[in-house]
Amino acid sequence: MKKFIEKIKECKDLEKSKEILFSVVKKDPKVEYALNFAIKAHENQFRKSGEPYVVHPILVASIVGYISHDETMVIAALLHDVVEDTPITIEEIYKNFGKDVANLVEGLTKIVEIRDKSLIPSYINEKLITSAMSFRKILIASIKDVRVLVIKLCDRLHNMLTLDALPINKQKRIAEETLVVYAPIAHRLGISFLKNLLEDLSFYYIFPNEYKKIDDFIQSHKQELQIKLNNFIDDVKKVLVKNGFRANDFNIISRIKHYYSIYLKMQRKGISIEEVLDLLAIRVLVKHKIDCYKALGAIHLNFKPLIMRFKDYVAIPKENGYQTIHTTVFDNTSIFEVQIRTYDMHKTAEYGVAAHWKYKIGANNINLKWLENLQFQNENIEEFMELVKNDLYSEDISVFSPKGDIFTLPRGAVALDFAYAVHTDIGNRAKEVYINKQKSTLLTELKNGDIVKIITSEKPILRCSWIDAVKTSKAKEQMRQACKQKIKEINSKSAINILSSELRVSKEEIEKWVEKNNLKNSIYKVPIDINFFKEIKNRFLADLRKEKKILPFIGGRNIKLKEQIFDNFVIYSSFNINRVEFDYCCNPKMGDEIVAFRKNNFAIIHHKLCEHAAELINSGEPMLFIEWSRSRLPKYKLLVSLQNKKGALASFLGYLAKLDINIISIELGRNIEYSNICELEIETDISNSELLRKKLESKVKVIEITGSDDAYKR
């Protein structure tokens, strides 16, 4: 594997690239025809580094052939840039190579079109957000044929291997994009060798100093580490042979943890590289599934295991098809991770979905339902980023229904996530949960192996304040949809009350007018859009004048809506409002959905989802148009990494106060494994984000800074 990747990286020559291709792919007429077709199509085209452009698709096809041995995919890889970069049309591909190849090439061409329209340069703050949005479309387009993704991953690997030919700013931009989107997709498809390579190559360009520190340690200790591994392998071989295995019944491979994985472990745990327990590992490959357990027994009886680090993914495979027994043992003074799997499991672990050329959802234990789940995301960029962080990046846990059905969820998922994973209706109506036969709350975080039983109510239960507490994109999106629908209903009813109050007519008259003018589907906008409110008000009065109905209280004059400002609120009304008050029943905080009722010259504010407010709305109480006043200060969303020491947060908050920065919201340690990561929304008069970044980086490590008033609201 390593030698093959080195050959790919060093190859700049057409003839050598053809040699590499036919070293992994059978030389038959179809492949040769596609090769010559690509060479002719890309004639006189060159890459930035100077070599003939066609070398790139040939080497991408070589990587595809190496991991899949699928002739159709190899041909599509050879032709993947032809439609985009040459006069050749998709119809010509169809005519010359058939429907299957044409569909793959068309899918790959669409990816290029989407990416070129949406990808933003690295130095712009919203880079990953907008980039991620474009890739949502790519992933959804790949549901029909996941082979498109596999070829695209191989294309990206070759681009990363030759990234040194590009300017530094482009290197970083492409590396960031690779780390945030492509590597997680490779993980989800179970192609671990691609995932590891993409992560390490990205790590090299994004964090060169951190990469160098790890590389210096590994290189300076290489001989010592290899000796430890060789001695341990010899010990394990002796143990296995002693316990009934023949020498040709198994194979043992050694490995040192890949660099980016080491870096993440150091960041998560706040430890040095010397403290990374699974730095050294071996893989024991056996012929049959039962042999995995025989080997495990022999190893546990002869080496002291760290029992808390034992995982059995053979009995309970991961969603991406991964099957391996993981254990960690002591040998003398050293600690080693031991992975035990069959040869078939090893092929699936390394090449995932690409190891099986029948790409059907659920086939060969590889579950691709996560691709379908992307359809639960709407077009909101911020919400899609939650998917990227939660669904693509996260490690998985497996939990069980009382009947023994397995459900794979991201680590950190709660019982309500499980309810939605079972069925949307179960999630909407979930009222109680029993975890391992113990009554628990629906927000209880689930652990690997939990047995979860959901008790449902007859009617759906709205939980709008719980959206941030659930982990999966499906749960978040279904809850958001239900809440948006409920708020839309409340807005429609409030609109009638506001219009009735301001126009001094009955609710019934407003409702008849709305029906007559076909406004039932848009009237909900009255309480949330002042311009629409004014338009509707003027239309109603104009209709009255046409019908020659003059309202006595206005004497034919228009009703003027005055802007009235109270601290954090703006009210538009023809009535003079003297004071704003909160009722006792709910406590809306800044930015929450709110409604206001008019009582004489007072405005009484409620949360829009308050039950008492619902009663008042249904009874037709006079209402007012109200909204939060908008601060003119720029707002930013920050993701920062705090030092792993006592008082780090307090020190940082004190520093923000000195800079006269107002904190709107703050969240620390949302993910236990990233407990030093802090998410904030702030207000500041510093309008230049790069200047703000420099000021903050004197105190903390800034991971991401985004203007919440632009990128998140596009």
Image: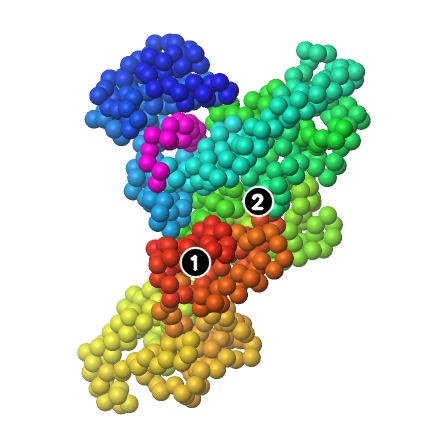
Which residue corresponds to the image point at 45% horizontal and 63% vertical from the top-left?
682
Which residue corresponds to the image point at 50% horizontal and 72% vertical from the top-left?
588
Which residue corresponds to the image point at 38% horizontal and 73% vertical from the top-left?
629
Q: Position of residue 206 (x, y in %)?
A: 44, 40
Q: Position of residue 78 (x, y in %)?
A: 34, 21
Kind of residue at badge 1:
Lys
Query: Seen from this angle, which residue lies furthest front?
Result: 220
Instruction: Specify which label sits upstream in the sequence, 2 or 1.
Output: 2
Q: Is residue 152 magenta?
A: yes
Question: Residue under circle 1?
Answer: 695
Q: How far is the residue under mark 2 from the one under mark 1? A: 23 Å
Q: Residues within 10 Å of mark 2 (few under 14, many from 20)?
A: some
Q: Which residues are magenta?
A: 146-169
Question: Residue under circle 2?
Answer: 267
> Is 471 above or below relative to 292?
below
Which residue corresponds to the image point at 41% horizontal and 76% vertical from the top-left?
569
Residue 106 showing in the rendered view: yes
Task: State the residue in front, 535 or 496.
Answer: 535
